[in-house]
Amino acid sequence: MAQHANLTLTEAAVQLGMALKARGLMLAMAESCTGGMVAEAITSIAGSSAWFDRGFVTYSNAAKIDMLDVSSTTLEQFGAVSEQTAIEMAIGALKNSAAQITGSITGIAGPDGGSPDKPVGTVCFAWAVKNLPVTTCTRCFNGDRKSVREQAAIFMMAGLIEKLIRETV
């Protein structure tokens, strides 16, 4: 994703939209720590309704369970900030939308909430495409709350672009 590292939110959303539109696919997002930042960047683009179905902002654990079918056992065992939770969020977004591809973001934007194993800036991601394995990764971003959230949103969109380029979706 190095080629997308220096994109702005808007540039990432435009490139993602072009990739989705070219493939005739719909996207849904499941966001926690970014609070809908990816969905906001996408919907600021005229015509994005052709390729963006919906966004789920599931900030609380209850919202993750209610809206995305995240298992309470997963949340208890691994925590909200985990690749396991991100996977269930992405799959839940697929299941509860008309999208063929989804992304999920869950993390600790700060300034509080970090721990030695999950410091502030830790963000877990998942990308899901119908009938393909879910991919995940965890990154630790530096900066203040706004910066962590923006970096996470751009990283998510860059990951979606890469998935669309690399996979036969």
Image (cartoon, rainbow, N blue to C red):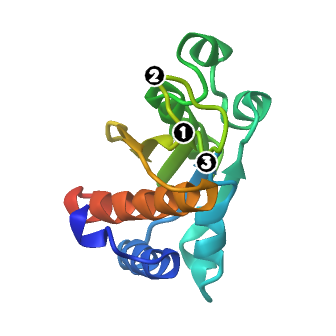
In x, y percent, where is residue 110? 63, 44
In x, y percent, where is residue 54? 66, 60
Q: Residue most toward the bottom?
A: 46
Residue 117: which disc? Answer: 2
Amino acid type assigned to the residue bearing label 1 in the image: Val
Amino acid type assigned to the residue bearing label 3 in the image: Ala
**Residue highlighted by disc 1:** 120
Q: Marks 3/2: CA distance?
A: 24 Å
Q: Marks 1/2: CA distance?
A: 10 Å
**Residue highlighted by disc 3:** 30
Secondary structure beneath disc 3? strand
Secondary structure beneath disc 1? loop
Position above or below: 33 against 163: above
Position above or below: 44 against 67: below
* The C terminus lies in quadrant: bottom left
Disc 3 crowd, CA 10 A, few/some/many (<14, 14-19, 20+): many
Among numbered discs 1 and 3, the one appearing first in the sequence:
3
In x, y percent, where is residue 106? 57, 40
Residue depicted at x 38% and y 76%: 7
Viewer can see residue 59: yes
Q: Which of 99 and 57 is in front in this view?
A: 57
Taking the image as shown, residue 64 lies to the left or right of residue 101, namely right
Residue depicted at x 54% and y 39%: 120
Residue 166: which disc? Answer: none
Viewer can see residue 169: no
Q: CB under 8 Å between callouts 1 and 2? A: no
Amino acid type assigned to the residue bearing label 2 in the image: Asp
In x, y percent, where is residue 107? 56, 40
